[in-house]
Amino acid sequence: MLGTMPVERKRRKVLTIKDREALAQALALLGRSHLSSNLNQLAYAANIGSLPLTPETEADLRAALADIRDLRRLLLTALGFRPEERS
């Protein structure tokens, strides 16, 4: 809007070539992991009622979710972004 202060852009830190190569390798491994496809299959099974939601299954799913959140945070940090804070 006119008359408002412009939002200051955050600068990303510059990655070294070694950091870029490591990040590229990590992203390639993540892409080959079929993680999104596997999660989609789990969501579909849960939606149609064929995924038995035992306490062990729920604990495994919560652990996987925590791992995915950690992975996202680490990748954003590696790219120079500050992940949003969540309560």
Image (cartoon, grey):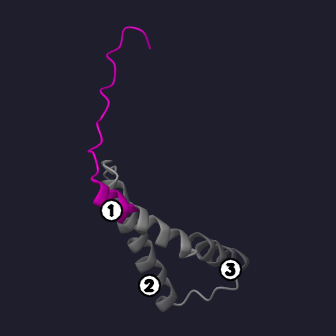
User: Which numbered disc covers residue 59?
Assistant: 2
Residues drawn in magenta: 1-23
Tell me whether circle 3 and circle 2 mark residues in contact (CB < 8 Å): no
- The amino acid type found where label 1 is placed reads Leu
Name the foreground residue: 86 vs 82.
82
User: Is residue 52 visible in the rendered structure shown here?
Assistant: yes
Residue position for label 3: 45
**Inter-mark Cα distance, 1 to 2:** 23 Å
- The amino acid type found where label 2 is placed reads Ala
Residue position for label 1: 74
Tell me whether circle 3 and circle 1 mark residues in contact (CB < 8 Å): no
- The amino acid type found where label 3 is placed reads Ala
Q: Is residue 34 left or right of residue 1?
A: right
Element under label 1?
helix
**Inter-mark Cα distance, 3 to 1:** 29 Å
Quadrant in the picture for residue 8: top left
User: Is residue 87 visible in the rendered structure shown here?
Assistant: no
N-term-proximal mark, 3 vs 1: 3
Name the foreground residue: 79 vs 60.
79
Spot occupied by residue 30 in the image (x, y as percentages of width and height): 48, 70
Spot occupied by residue 83 in the image (x, y as percentages of width and height): 33, 51
What is the magenta segment's predominant secondary structure?
loop
Report the mark closest to the observer, 1 or 2: 1
